Image (cartoon, helix red, strand yellow):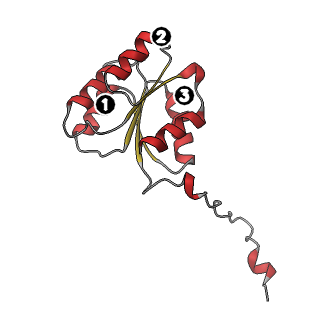
Amino acid sequence: MLNIPGLMPLPGSTLPAPARPAEEATPDRAHILVVDDSITTRTLEKSILEAHGYRVTLCVDGREALERLSEGMEVGLIISDVEMPRMDGFALLQAVKADKRLEEIPVILVTSRASDEDRERGLRLGADAYIVKTRFDQNELLAGIRRLL
C-alpha cells in the first residue's frame, strides 16, 4: 500500500536532482581548473561544468593558475583561454607540459583566436583540444572532457 501524501514533497522543500545516466556520470567528481580573464566566460564555463557534476576552480590568468598548481592543487584537466594578462594560455600550457609533476594533465584551449597558425601552435605546445569561442559548442566541450578524463 502506498502512502501518497508521504511521497509528495513538503511545502518549501525541494525535489532531489534527477539521477544522471551512467555515461554522463563523472568519476569521483573530477576537478577542472578554468583559466580565463573574462568573468563572463569563467562563469559560463563553471555553470556548464558544475551542472554536469564536475568540481571547478577558477583563475583569472595563467600566472594564478600556475601558482595554484605549484602549491599542490590537484586537477584532472585544465581549460584555458589564450589571451590573458600576466601569463597567456600558450605560456601556461608550455609551463604545465614542462613540469614533470603536471605534464600529464590534459589541457583544452578555448579561445577567440581562430587562425590556423594559433591552432597549430596550441596543439604543437601540447594542447589536447583547441576550441574557438565563436564556434563554442557545449556538447563538444563536454565530449572532449569525458574523452580526456
Whichever of callouts 3 and 2 sits on the residue coming sooner in the sequence is 3
The extreme bottom residue here reads 1
> Which x, y percent locates residue 71?
22, 41
Of badges 3 and 2, the one in the foreground is: 2
Looking at the image, residue 130 sits to the left or right of residue 8; the answer is left
Q: Which amino acid lies under the numbered mark 3 shown in the image of this protein?
A: Thr
The label number, if any, that marks residue 115 in the structure image: 2
- Dot 3, how many residues are within 10 Å of its Cα: few (below 14), some (14-19), or many (20+)? few
* Numbered disc 2: secondary structure: loop
- SS under mark 3: helix
| Camera-nearest residue between 110 and 24 | 24
Residue for badge 3: 40
Q: Disc 1 marks which residue? A: 64
Name the residue type under label 2: Ser
User: Would you identify the image quadrant in which residue 89 lies?
Assistant: top left
Q: CA distance from mark 3 to mark 1?
A: 18 Å
Count numbered badges in the picture: 3
Mark positioned earlier in the residue sequence (1 or 2):
1
What's the CA distance linking mark 3 and mark 2? 23 Å
User: Badge 1 local density, few (<14 within 10 Å), some, or many (20+)?
Assistant: some
Relative horizontal placement of residue 128, taking residue 70 as reference (left or right)? right
Q: How many other residues sit within 10 Å of disc 2, few (<14), some (14-19) or many (≥20)?
A: few
Amino acid type assigned to the residue bearing label 1 in the image: Glu
Q: Position of residue 137 (x, y in %)?
A: 60, 30
Q: Position of residue 23 (x, y in %)?
A: 56, 54
Eyeballing the image, is 50 above or below 67?
below
| x and y, in percent, of residue 91 in the image | 29, 21
Residue at image point 24% right, 27% down: 95
Gap in angstroms between the C-alphas marked 1 and 2: 26 Å
Q: Is residue 94 visible?
A: yes
Res. 88 in view? no
